[in-house]
């Protein structure tokens, strides 16, 4: 049976001579018959072999159904020379006559050479197209334009202007999500509570559905874009287009993050402050243990916070029945199979430890001076100066790198003073290192201040819960402790050390 194979990718849809209809018509004329089996892959890139109709064709060839294949051009089988040669040889070995509309490729050394040259040119053309598209997108990003619509909730993409514009309704929802997560309230608890509230109130998602999943809320809370900084060229997505053709998860290409120096920072409208975002990240790092549930009978106030100072194991809640007396403990013993460290046997009564820790927490909450110790220097002029310095240093580093690149290009020319250029390159490299050290120092200072401000907000939020409730129940206690305490360590002598945020 005679077969026809036709393929067109999305980018080739409008090209003359590459439309599916054109290819099929010309293949039928070449075959001199309409009695053919058609195999058509529409919208599939020739870069990958995993195409549904090509796979069906290869199976039919293997089963002996096909005796002759007519194709418009070898690059319809594959844009990659090696893949095209593999398919051509695979079909010829099974006795299939290979016929191409756009040229004759006899099964001779000369024919194979011409075939290879055509394939190499086609592969080169595809590579150049990809290179031009990539460099074009990168250039636009450097110019401050957003080159791709990532459908970020809270923004609308303006393709003409190449930027994100604030969607006022969605931006209010984003602000609500951050406020509910970072400020004490009686409406919701945690990410799941926020998702349920938005669903109950009928707030539409970006895809205009009425159900909010906790993961969607979490992704919003993790997205730094809302602070007005959108990073492009951050993710390396090379090869992921082939994932949709691969059934085995192990074979799929994973998205990786490029080195931070390759990221391109683009300014867009701000929805939340940087301080609130940083505070949300602090809360997210402990979200699981802050909102962990436990049974009423075996509640452990310090669950997830206690660690043995001797062996390093976490100390989890243990429930024992000794001679009719039920007791709660925190123990470092790990009896499950595969435990890396079985523990040193450190054990402490839950009631005594919880009472000791809560007493220390109350001392912090009752003493206003404790709050004052957390208050950072709130000088806007210093903050603005630091922000300007960071931006200035980043620009200087970028200029130095571009200068080094130009000198490296001059270095390759024969009529240039290579020794002088070499010295200039060394000077620029030393200057870059010095600038990077200055930038790193300022960024660390800013981060330290941000962490201090986050600690202050946690303490103030905890005090708000403490002061407004006449009676503090278990949930309130647990919430307050987990807002303030990073870790509790206990040694063999039951000495307790509390590490605050």
Image: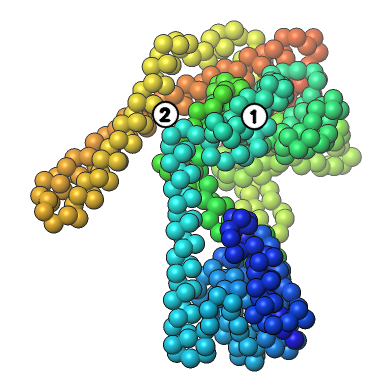
Image location (x, y in percent) of residue 444: 42, 29
Q: Nearer the viewer, residue 466 or 79?
A: 79
Q: State the mark number for residue 444.
A: 2
- Picture quarter containing residue 41? bottom right
Image location (x, y in percent) of residue 451: 52, 24
From what the image shows, is residue 454 above or below residue 88? Answer: above
* Disc 1 element: strand
Q: Earlier in the sequence, mark 1 or mark 2?
A: 1
Q: Which residue is mark 1?
A: 155
Q: Residues within 10 Å of mark 1 (few under 14, many from 20)?
A: many
Q: Nearer the viewer, residue 295 or 83?
A: 83
- Picture quarter containing residue 331? top right
Residue 301 in view in this figure: no
Image location (x, y in percent) of residue 204: 79, 31
Residue 446 in view in this figure: yes
From what the image shows, is residue 55 above or below residue 396? Answer: below
- Picture quarter containing residue 301? top right
Q: Residues within 10 Å of mark 2 (few under 14, many from 20)?
A: few
How far is disc 1 from disc 2 in space, using C-alphas?
31 Å
Q: Residue at x 42, y 16 (%)?
A: 384
Q: Tell which residue pokes out farthest to the right in this image.
A: 324
- Image quadrant where one finds the N terminus: bottom right
Image location (x, y in percent) of residue 117: 44, 76
Q: Residue at x 52, y 51 (%)?
A: 236
Do the residues bearing badges 1 and 2 touch, measured as CB atoms within 8 Å? Answer: no
Q: Nearer the viewer, residue 356 or 300?
A: 300
From what the image shows, is residue 62 above or below residue 284? Answer: below
Q: Tell which residue pokes out farthest to the top in this image.
A: 368
Q: Residue at x 66, y 55 (%)?
A: 339
Q: Residue at x 72, y 55 (%)?
A: 336
Q: On the picture, is 125 further left or further right than 163? A: left
Q: On the picture, is 468 further left or further right than 22? A: right
């Amino acid at each position: 049976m005679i077969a026809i194979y036709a393929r067109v990718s999305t980018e080739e849809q409008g090209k003359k001579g590459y439309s599916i209809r054109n290819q099929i018509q010309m293949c039928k004329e070449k075959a001199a018959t309409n009695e053919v089996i058609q195999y058509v892959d529409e919208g599939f890139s020739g870069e990958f072999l995993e195409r549904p109709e090509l796979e069906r064709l290869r199976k039919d060839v293997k089963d002996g159904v096909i005796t002759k294949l007519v194709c418009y051009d070898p690059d319809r089988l594959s844009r990659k020379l090696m893949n095209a040669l593999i398919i051509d040889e695979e079909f010829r070995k099974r006795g299939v006559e290979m016929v191409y509309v756009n040229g004759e490729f006899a099964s001779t050394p000369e024919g194979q050479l011409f075939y290879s040259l055509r394939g190499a040119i086609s592969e080169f053309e595809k590579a150049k197209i990809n290179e031009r598209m990539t460099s074009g997108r990168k250039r636009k990003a450097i110019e401050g334009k957003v080159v791709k619509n990532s459908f970020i909730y809270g923004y609308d993409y303006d393709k003409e202007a190449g930027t994100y514009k604030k969607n006022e309704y969605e931006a209010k929802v984003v602000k609500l999500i951050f406020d509910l997560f970072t400020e004490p309230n009686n409406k919701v608890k945690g990410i799941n509570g926020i998702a349920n509230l938005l669903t109950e109130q009928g707030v539409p998602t970006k895809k205009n559905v009425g159900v909010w999943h906790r993961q969607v809320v979490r992704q919003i809370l993790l997205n730094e874009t809302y602070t007005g900084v959108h990073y492009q060229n951050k993710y390396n997505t090379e090869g992921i287009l082939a994932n949709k053709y691969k059934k085995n998860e192990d074979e799929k290409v994973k998205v990786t993050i490029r080195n931070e120096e390759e990221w391109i920072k683009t300014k867009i409208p701000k929805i939340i402050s940087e301080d609130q975002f940083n505070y949300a990240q602090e809360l997210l790092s402990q979200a699981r243990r802050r909102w962990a549930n436990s049974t009423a009978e075996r509640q452990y106030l310090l669950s997830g916070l206690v660690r043995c100072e001797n062996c390093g194991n976490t100390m989890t809640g243990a429930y024992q029945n000794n001679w009719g007396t039920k007791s709660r403990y925190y123990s470092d013993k790990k009896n499950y199979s595969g435990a890396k460290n079985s523990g040193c046997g450190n054990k402490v009564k839950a009631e005594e430890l919880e009472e000791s820790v809560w007493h220390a927490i109350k001392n912090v909450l009752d003493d206003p001076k404790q709050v004052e110790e957390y208050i950072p220097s709130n000088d806007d002029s210093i903050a603005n100066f630091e922000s300007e310095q960071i931006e200035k240093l980043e620009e200087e580093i970028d200029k130095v790198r571009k200068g080094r690149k130009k000198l490296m290009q001059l270095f390759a020319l024969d009529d240039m003073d290579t020794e002088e250029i070499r010295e200039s390159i060394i000077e620029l490299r030393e200057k870059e290192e010095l600038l990077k050290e200055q930038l790193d120092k300022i960024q660390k200072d800013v981060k330290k201040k941000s962490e201090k401000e986050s600690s202050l907000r946690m303490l103030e939020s905890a005090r708000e819960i403490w002061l407004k409730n006449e009676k503090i129940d278990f949930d309130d206690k647990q919430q307050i402790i987990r807002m303030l305490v990073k870790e509790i360590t206990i040694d063999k002598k039951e000495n307790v050390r509390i590490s605050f945020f």
